[in-house]
Image (spheres, rainbow, N blue to C red):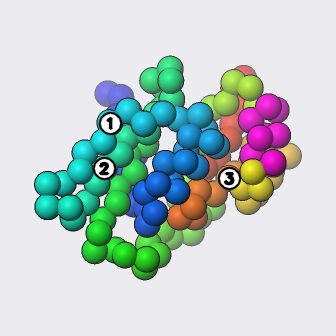
Amino acid sequence: MQLSHVSLHVRDLEKSIKFYEDALGFEKQMEMPMPDGSAKLVFMGSKDGGAQVELTWLKEQGDKPYDIGEEEVIHLGFMVQNFDEVKAKHTEMNCIVFDNPMLGVYFIADPDGYWLEMIPAR
């Protein structure tokens, strides 16, 4: 069995798409708008096919934030080949929310507050 993707509900789809492009180098792989305009799914993924996230926008949500639970508990982890380079980029983007030098990992937050753990590939 292989995990296909994780769905994250987002308030501002374009802002989230840009974040995942800039922060993780993901590309838009597929877009699925609902015919009635009530929702849109955008699949963002790594060029190597190793990771994919479904960004789900629901019209009815409007500007109301989603309750995503405790960020440091609910998070996605990504193995990063060029860890130092990526960390420098995230530092420049000012999106690092927690750095754990003892474990050698750090976390960034996307525009909706989802935490993404950056783990050096060993």
Left or right for 83, reference 25: right
Q: Residue at x 68, y 41 (%)?
A: 118
**Range of residues picked out in magenta:** 84-92
Residue 78 can be seen in this image: no
Q: Residue at x 30, y 42 (%)?
A: 31
In three-dimensional space, the C-alpha distance between marks 1 and 3, rounded to whole angstroms, equals 24 Å
The secondary structure making up most of the magenta span is helix
Q: Decide: is 17 above or below 65.
A: above
Q: Decide: is 58 above or below 32.
A: below
Q: Decide: is 13 above or below 85.
A: below
Residue under pointer 2: 41
Q: Amino acid at mark 3?
A: Ile
Q: Residues within 10 Å of mark 3 (few under 14, many from 20)?
A: many
Q: Amino acid at mark 1?
A: Met
Q: Residues within 10 Å of mark 2 (few under 14, many from 20)?
A: many
In three-dimensional space, the C-alpha distance between marks 1 and 2, rounded to whole angstroms, equals 8 Å
Residue situated furthest bottom in the rendering: 64
Looking at the image, is mark 3 or mark 2 earlier in the sequence?
Answer: 2
Residue under pointer 3: 108
Could you tell me which secondary element the residue under label 1 belongs to?
strand
Residue under pointer 1: 30
x then y, percent, for residue 54: 38, 46
Q: Quadrant of residue 10?
A: bottom left
Q: Confirm or deny contact between disc 1 and disc 2 (CB under 8 A).
A: yes
Viewer-closest of 37 and 91:
37
